[in-house]
Amino acid sequence: MSSLSVFSISLAGFVAGAVHVVTGPDHLAAVAPFAIQENRRSWILGLKWGLGHASGVVLVALFAWVLRDTLSVEVFSSHCERLVGLMLIAIGIWGLRRTFGVHAHSHHHPEHPAEHTHLHIHAGQDHQCHTHAALGVGILHGLAGASHFLGVLPALAMPTRTAAAVYLVLFGIGTIVSMSGFSFLIGSLGSRLAHSGLSYFRGIAATVSTASVALGIFWIAR
């Protein structure tokens, strides 16, 4: 392959992966309640989700190839879709409980004579738990549905296996970068709101968590 071909295939795979993430409301709704409870380390949640998603897609491909005569991939993905709905509801409920468990504390700093109030989100101790959860959520998303197959479908039309591999690798990288960016933005928003006041933070965090519950109900009922 020429360098131009490699660049074109890489760009196509990366963009397809990034678009796949931001056009999937279930992807965003599942990660947002975790990310808004974090600080600027929230991008790690997106990284873990992306790695999990790529792993899930690979697992589906392996299942389809190894068990092609005994397992219906469509039925398997359908069951995973329902699990995604239940997962979204559970994440949303968890987010609501965390949101209304946040409290404002008064602190005195030497450089400021007057005591003033900060909103503190004590998420550091839960950060590792959140990243593990994001990894698991990503794997389940990779296993569920057929939307990601549309994204990787162009790989089947590539002239060589090398070209197909380049496309698939960049598709995975695109999903990781896109979700990492989204998680970072949500985490930064939560951090800013935490310094603005309890009501602002609770309002946005509750909205994000409620949206996750609503989307989960829709995912199961559709």
Image (cartoon, rainbow, N blue to C red):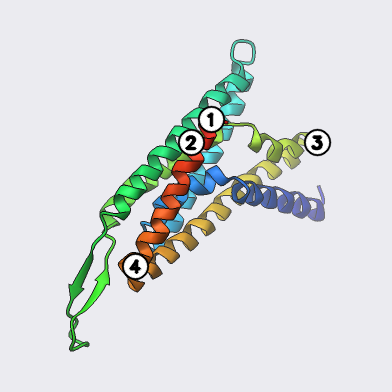
Say what amino acid the circle numbered 2 marks: Ile
Q: Of marks 4 and 3, which one's residue comes earlier in the chain? A: 3
**Residue at horizontal 40 percent and vertical 51 percent from the top:** 34
The residue tagged 3 is: 157
Q: CA distance from mark 4 to mark 3?
A: 49 Å
Q: Name the residue beneath numbered marker 2.
A: 217
The location of residue 187, given as percent across then percent down, is 43, 61
Q: Earlier in the sequence, mark 3 or mark 2?
A: 3
**Can residue 136 be seen?**
no
Q: Quadrant of residue 157?
A: top right
Question: Mark 4 near mark 3, Cβ–Cβ under 8 Å?
Answer: no
Contact between marks 1 and 2 (CB within 8 A): the answer is yes
Q: Secondary structure at mark 2?
A: helix
Residue 154 position in % (x across, y down):
76, 39
Q: Amino acid at mark 4?
A: Ala
State whether residue 90 is above or below residue 72.
below
The residue at 54%/43% (across/down) is 26
Q: Residues within 10 Å of mark 2 (few under 14, many from 20)?
A: some
Is label 3 or label 2 in front? 2
In this view, 140 is above or below 105? above
Mark positioned earlier in the residue sequence (3 or 1): 3
Which mark lies nearer to you, 2 or 4? 2
Please tell me whether residue 129 is drawn above or below residue 3 in the rendered image.
above
Residue at (59% x, 14% y) in the render = 71
Q: What secondary structure is marked by label 3?
A: helix
- Label drawn at residue 221: 1
Q: Nearer the viewer, residue 4 or 213?
A: 213
Q: Which residue, given by chain and number where applicable, does mark 4 sit on?
A: 194
